Image (tube, rainbow, N blue to C red):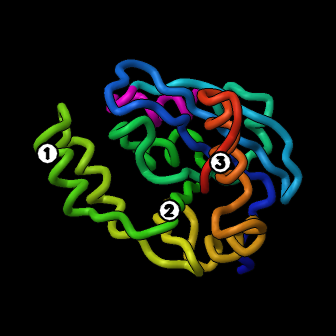
């Protein structure tokens, strides 16, 4: 059996926000066909909320790109603070694999502590993270995955990492999200 090749990918990142921000946070998705940048999806999620998977499902499912997208990439498992993406619901509802990418290994014990002691309904969010398990290193990044093998993840990362260590769909989403808030993109991805 041959491994699936993922040529159409959407990558999501959230926009920057201040620590004392309350309410919605902008979310940007960039759609790629191979290394060709094909489009942008923009939405919002609630800071520290529970709506990230639902909003991603709506954004992808309601887009003109829905029938072509083969893989969802996330810049980390949380959006807008501690709005943990239920990647299992995302995978199940859209029937698409999900690849979570991070530049460095997160401190899971610090995340657990923060969720359980400072975030409303943090135990529910921690359950998703616990089910997903530890991040694994592939090349220079760390990943978590649902519906995609380690070999497939390595292949798609090899295809989409061109500048730096982050795949182009996530790098571009990060730059656009920053520009939405600051008027221009800045900083490292």
SS of the residue under disc 1: helix
Q: How far is the residue under mark 2 from the one under mark 3? A: 12 Å
Residue behind mark 3: 11
Q: Residue at x 13, y 45 (%)?
A: 116
Is residue 174 part of the magenta span, yes or no? no
| Measured Cα–Cα span from mark 2 to mark 1 | 22 Å
Q: Tell me the quadrant of the picture where the N terminus can be found.
A: bottom right
Question: Which quadrant of the figure contains the C terminus?
Answer: bottom right
Q: Observer-nearest residue: 149 or 113?
A: 113
Report which residue position mark 2 lands on.
102
Is 22 situated above or below 124? above
Q: Nearer the viewer, residue 116 or 182?
A: 182
**Magenta-tinted stretch:** 47-58
- Disc number placed over residue 116 in the picture, else none: 1
Number of residues whose C-alpha sits closer than 10 Å to that of mark 2, classed few (under 14), some (14–19) or many (20 or more): many
Earlier in the chain: of badge 2 and badge 1, it is: 2
Query: Reading the chain from its start, which is encountered first: label 3 or label 1?
Result: 3
Q: How many marks?
A: 3
The residue shown at (34%, 69%) is 134
Q: Is residue 7 visible?
A: yes
Q: Is residue 30 left or right of residue 14?
A: right
Dot in front, 2 or 3 = 2
Could you give the CA–CA distance between mark 3 and mark 1, rounded to whole angstroms? 28 Å
Where residue 44 appears, as percent x and y from the top left, is: 53, 24
Crowd tier of the residue under label 3, counting other residues whose Cα lies within 10 Å: few below 14, some 14–19, many 20 or above: many
């Amino acid at each position: 059996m041959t491994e699936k090749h993922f040529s159409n990918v959407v990558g999501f990142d959230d926009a920057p926000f201040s620590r004392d921000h309350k309410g919605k946070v902008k979310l940007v998705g960039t759609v790629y066909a191979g290394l060709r940048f094909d489009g942008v999806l923009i939405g919002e999620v609630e800071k520290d909320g529970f709506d990230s998977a639902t909003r991603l499902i709506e954004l992808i499912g309601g887009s003109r790109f829905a029938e072509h997208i083969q893989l969802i990439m996330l810049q980390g498992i949380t959006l807008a603070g501690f709005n943990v993406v239920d990647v299992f619901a995302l995978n199940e509802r859209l029937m698409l694999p999900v690849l979570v990418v991070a530049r460095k290994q997160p401190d899971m014990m610090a995340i657990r502590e923060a969720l359980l002691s400072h975030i409303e309904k943090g135990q529910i969010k921690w359950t998703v993270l616990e089910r997903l398990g530890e991040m694994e290193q592939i090349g220079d990044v760390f990943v978590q995955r649902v519906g995609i093998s380690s070999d497939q993840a390595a292949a798609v990362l090899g295809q989409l990492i061109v500048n730096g260590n982050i795949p182009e769909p996530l790098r571009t989403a990060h730059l656009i999200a920053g520009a939405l808030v600051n008027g221009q993109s800045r900083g490292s991805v």
